[in-house]
Image (cartoon, rainbow, N blue to C red):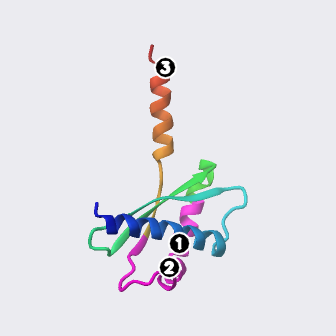
Amino acid sequence: MSHRLEKLNSLIQQELGSIIKEEIELPIDAFVTVSKVDTSVDIKHTNVYISVIPKNKAVGVIKKLNYNVYHLQKALNRKLVMRFVPKIRFVLDHSEEHAARIEEILSTKP
């Protein structure tokens, strides 16, 4: 991955995290973070990975974010000074569950 793309991913992660925190009403008992951003090489699309604790709130949070994606896209367009800002797609991040499962498997082996 190019250095420019890494910087763009980091910038989108920071800005979108702030926008979500300030402008979207999410469940009070849910802890939501933007864990990773993966932008395509042509900078037309970006997958935004969302981590939600507790897990039973995850589907509702993703639905709420997808419902507000137009508003979030507009807010991101205002914050980033770019010729073209990539289209946002929210994805539930399962990496923590996967890591916990691997750790569980490794701890049970002698």
Q: Are marks 1 and 3 in contact (CB under 8 Å)?
A: no
The prevailing secondary structure element of the residues shown in magenta is helix
Q: Are marks 3 and 2 in contact (CB under 8 Å)?
A: no
Residue 39, disc: none
- Label 1 vs label 2: CA separation? 7 Å
Q: Residue furthest right?
A: 28
Residue count near mark 1 (Cα–Cα under 10 Å), binned few <14, some 14–19, many ≥20: some
In the image, 80 versus 50, the foreground residue is 80
Residue 76, disc: 2
Query: Considering only vertical position in the picture, is 14 above or below 36?
Result: below
Q: Counting residues from the N terminus, which is met first, the one under dot 3 or under dot 2? A: 2
Specify the segment rendered in magenta.
60-88
Amino acid type of the residue that numbered disc 3 sits on in the rendered structure: Thr
Q: Residue at x 46, y 81 (%)?
A: 80
Query: Considering only vertical position in the picture, is 94 above or below 25?
Result: above
80 magenta-colored: yes
Amino acid type of the residue that numbered disc 2 sits on in the rendered structure: Leu
Q: Residue at x 48, y 34 (%)?
A: 101
Residue located beneath label 3 in the image: 108
Residue located beneath label 1 in the image: 15
- Label 1 vs label 3: CA separation? 41 Å
Is disc 2 placed on a helix, strand or loop? helix
